[in-house]
């Protein structure tokens, strides 16, 4: 027994002598915390942050703030320092919001031969989805189809030109007739793409109701008009409205897209819309910001930011969307990596900022606020890395703008060496003239080098902005690997003598 012990000891001493003690310790420490990132803990945090007590994390609500406080408390527990306003974890901004109290209703009036009227009733969320920024009340009026709901005199285009919508319900589509988002010409149309513009324009023209053909899901935005009831509309009531008219929504739109000539018309159909909402004009909300300060006297001024929006689309009168994939997944990926980085004590020469963003769903308000009020100088920011819906699938992906294409290699190398998933690496579209649809594009538009991490080859159904996007909509195993990839890549990026952009 004693001989065997000595033999083993001698073997170990010889094996270890080939490496310096420091190297050995770094590698062992790195691997120890690499393995500490677990899908079990990730699943636990997903359940927490998707809990009904946070009520769908609608930015501005106390429930969103409670979720932000939960995340900040985690950062505090791991020794990640506050980087927000006045020594706190929170970076505040104004954010009026609307709470949908009841699901409301939608009815089509069907006149009968004997002069009576039958009302066909529709149900949510299949046939309609309550407008997240609707005024409160009940309206009954004729429905007027108004294409894209756009009035653009400088582009010689007006969906309201030949129709009178005063006191009427206006039925319209998302987007604009011009479709080539990669053409600079598109930039002239961008302001007409916003949901809040379309509601404003409907209210300006005196409409009392707005039926929005926009995927029939939760759609918060920044507009609110007391006297405009807004509802998303699904396929069945849309088909009923067009029945017997000899037209259909799709054909009309494709005609407009070719000719740029509006085709608006009064349908002759009458509908009743009902909504019950409460507006909170005094609303405020926040980003959550935590930092691991760099240890190198020269390099610590350089900051790597990784961010994900923490807010989701809330609870529309019982239609609760927990925001599991969108975007608890991104938040929890970041927190899992942050915990390993912070608690390992591994030296990071550059500074790392963890940014959980508020107000994304209503119009990218938190990222816009950050870029206007950066917590660290923009010129010292290495890159902003965005995660949105990163937790469903079997493959990994990284993309980057041309200004930091080289940084992708820190992530692909981490995967090649320790994770071994299939992984895609791409360049993000350099020129993009459309409405920014992610926090990453807000940073990109402000001149930051931006990257995004995502998962591919989805294995679970995606319930985009719908009930069903809960903690079961993600795969904790792929999230574990995303967190591990962030952890490894950040150790390399934070410590490289010279970053390879
Ligand atoms: Zn999202």
Image (tube, helix red, strand yellow):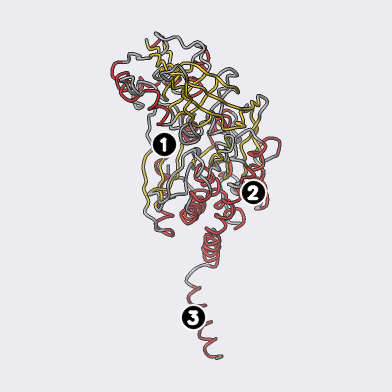
The residue wearing badge 3 is 11
Residue 401 pos. (x, y %): 41, 37
Say whether residue 248 is visible: yes
Is 36 on the left or on the right of 450, as rendered?
Answer: right
- Position of residue 102 relative to residue 338, above or below, is above
Residue 464 pos. (x, y %): 46, 39
Q: Do the residues labelled 1 and 2 touch (CB within 8 Å)?
A: no
Judged by depth in the image, the label closer to the viewer, 2 or 3, is 2
Q: Are marks 2 and 3 in contact (CB under 8 Å)?
A: no
- Mark sitting earlier along the chain (1/2): 2
The residue wearing badge 1 is 403
- Mark sitting earlier along the chain (1/3): 3
Cα separation, mark 1 vs mark 3, equals 49 Å
Residue 36 numbered mark, or none: none
Residue 252 falls in image quadrant: top left
Cα separation, mark 2 vs mark 3, equals 42 Å
Q: Which of 7 and 19 is in front in this view?
A: 7
């Amino acid at each position: 027994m004693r001989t065997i012990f000595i033999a083993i000891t001698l073997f170990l001493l010889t094996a270890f002598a080939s490496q310096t003690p420091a190297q050995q310790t770094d590698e062992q420490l790195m691997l120890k915390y690499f393995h500490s990132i677990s899908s079990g803990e990730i699943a636990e945090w997903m359940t927490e942050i998707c809990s009904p007590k946070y009520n769908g994390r609608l930015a501005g609500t106390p429930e969103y703030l409670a979720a932000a406080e939960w995340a900040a408390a985690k950062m505090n527990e791991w020794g990640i320092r506050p980087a927000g306003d006045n020594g706190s974890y929170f970076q505040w901004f104004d954010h009026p919001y609307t709470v949908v109290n009841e699901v409301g209703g939608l009815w089509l009036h069907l006149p009968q031969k004997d002069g009576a009227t039958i009302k066909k009733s529709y149900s949510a969320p299949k046939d309609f989805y309550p407008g997240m920024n609707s005024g409160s009340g009940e309206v009954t009026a004729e429905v007027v189809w108004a294409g894209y709901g756009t009035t653009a005199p400088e582009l010689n285009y007006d969906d309201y030109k030949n129709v009178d919508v005063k006191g009427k319900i206006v039925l319209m589509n998302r987007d604009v007739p011009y479709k080539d988002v990669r053409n600079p010409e598109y930039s002239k149309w961008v302001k007409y793409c916003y949901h809040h513009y379309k509601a404003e324009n409907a209210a300006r023209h005196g409409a009392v109701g707005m039926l929005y053909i926009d995927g029939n899901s939760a759609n918060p935005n920044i507009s609110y008009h007391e006297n405009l009831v807004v509802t998303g509309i699904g396929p069945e009531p849309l088909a009923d409205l067009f029945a017997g008219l000899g037209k259909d929504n799709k054909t009309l739109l494709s005609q407009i897209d070719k000719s740029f000539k509006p085709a608006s018309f009064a349908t002759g159909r009458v509908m009743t819309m009902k909504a019950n909402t409460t507006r909170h004009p005094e609303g405020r909300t926040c980003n959550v910001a935590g930092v691991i300060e760099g240890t190198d006297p020269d390099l610590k001024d350089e900051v790597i930011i990784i961010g994900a929006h923490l807010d989701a689309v809330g609870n529309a009168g019982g239609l609760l969307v927990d925001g599991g994939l969108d975007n608890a997944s991104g938040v929890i990926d970041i927190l899992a990596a942050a915990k390993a980085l912070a608690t390992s004590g591994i030296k990071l020469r550059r500074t790392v900022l963890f940014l959980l963003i508020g107000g994304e769903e209503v119009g990218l308000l938190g990222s816009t606020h950050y870029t206007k009020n950066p917590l660290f100088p923009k010129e010292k920011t290495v890159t902003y890395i965005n995660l949105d819906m990163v937790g469903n699938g079997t493959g990994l992906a990284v993309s980057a703008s041309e200004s930091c294409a080289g940084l992708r290699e820190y992530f692909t190398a981490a995967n090649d060496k320790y994770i071994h998933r299939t992984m895609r690496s791409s360049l993000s579209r350099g020129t993009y003239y459309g409405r920014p649809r992610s926090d990453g594009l807000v940073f990109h538009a402000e001149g930051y080098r931006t990257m995004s991490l995502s998962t591919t080859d989805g294995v679970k159904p995606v319930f985009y902005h719908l009930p069903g996007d809960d903690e079961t909509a993600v795969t904790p195993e792929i999230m574990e690997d995303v967190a591990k990839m962030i952890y490894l890549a950040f150790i390399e990026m934070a410590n490289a003598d010279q970053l390879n952009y």
